[in-house]
Image: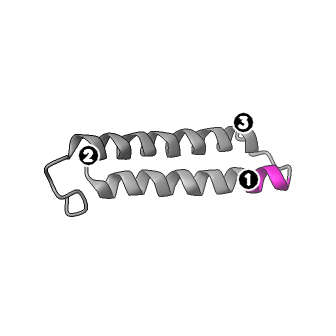
């Protein structure tokens, strides 16, 4: 997986988490989509991006990491 996909996944998690915090602050609900659910989804996406990033750091010992 390329770095741009990992960064995109992390940014998507940040956007979803921010939207969930906004829903939680204003006590708004869009159908089944609540603030708690969007916070959980956003944190899951950010954690998965962090795990992918750490796995890529560990697996690429001989290559230049930032140029891939």
Q: Residues within 10 Å of mark 2 (few under 14, many from 20)?
A: few
Is residue 1 rendered to the left or right of residue 14? left
Is the C-beta separation of discs 3 and 1 under 8 Å?
no
Taking the image as shown, residue 67 lies to the left or right of residue 34, namely: left
Magenta segment, prevailing SS (helix, strand or loop) = helix
Please name the residue shown 66% across and 57% down the image: 18
Residue range in magenta is 22-26
Check residue 21 in the rendering and tell me which mark sits there, or answer none.
Answer: 1
Q: Residues within 10 Å of mark 1 (few under 14, many from 20)?
A: some
Q: How far from the left and from the top, in percent, is residue 66?
A: 25, 62
Which of the two residues, 32 or 20, is positioned nearer the viewer here?
20
Q: Earlier in the sequence, mark 3 or mark 2?
A: 2
Q: How far is the residue under mark 1 from the one under mark 2?
A: 29 Å
Is residue 54 one of those drawn in magenta? no
Q: Secondary structure at mark 1?
A: helix
Decide which of tag 1 and tag 2 comes sooner along the chain: 2
Does dot 2 land on a helix, a strand or a loop?
A: loop
Q: Looking at the image, which is closer to me, 19 or 67?
A: 67
Residue 9 horizontal/vertical position (percent): 43, 51
Q: Which quadrant, please, contains the C terminus?
A: bottom left
Judge depth for marks 3 and 2 and give the one in front: 2
Residue that badge 2 annotates: 1
Image point 41% across, 39% down: which residue? 51
């Amino acid at each position: 997986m390329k770095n741009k996909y990992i960064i995109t996944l992390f940014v998507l998690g940040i956007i979803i988490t921010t939207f969930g915090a906004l829903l939680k602050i204003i006590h708004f609900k869009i159908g089944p989509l609540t603030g708690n659910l969007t916070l959980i989804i956003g944190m899951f996406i950010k954690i998965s991006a962090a795990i992918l990033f750490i796995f890529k750091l560990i697996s690429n010992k001989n290559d230049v990491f930032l140029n891939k």
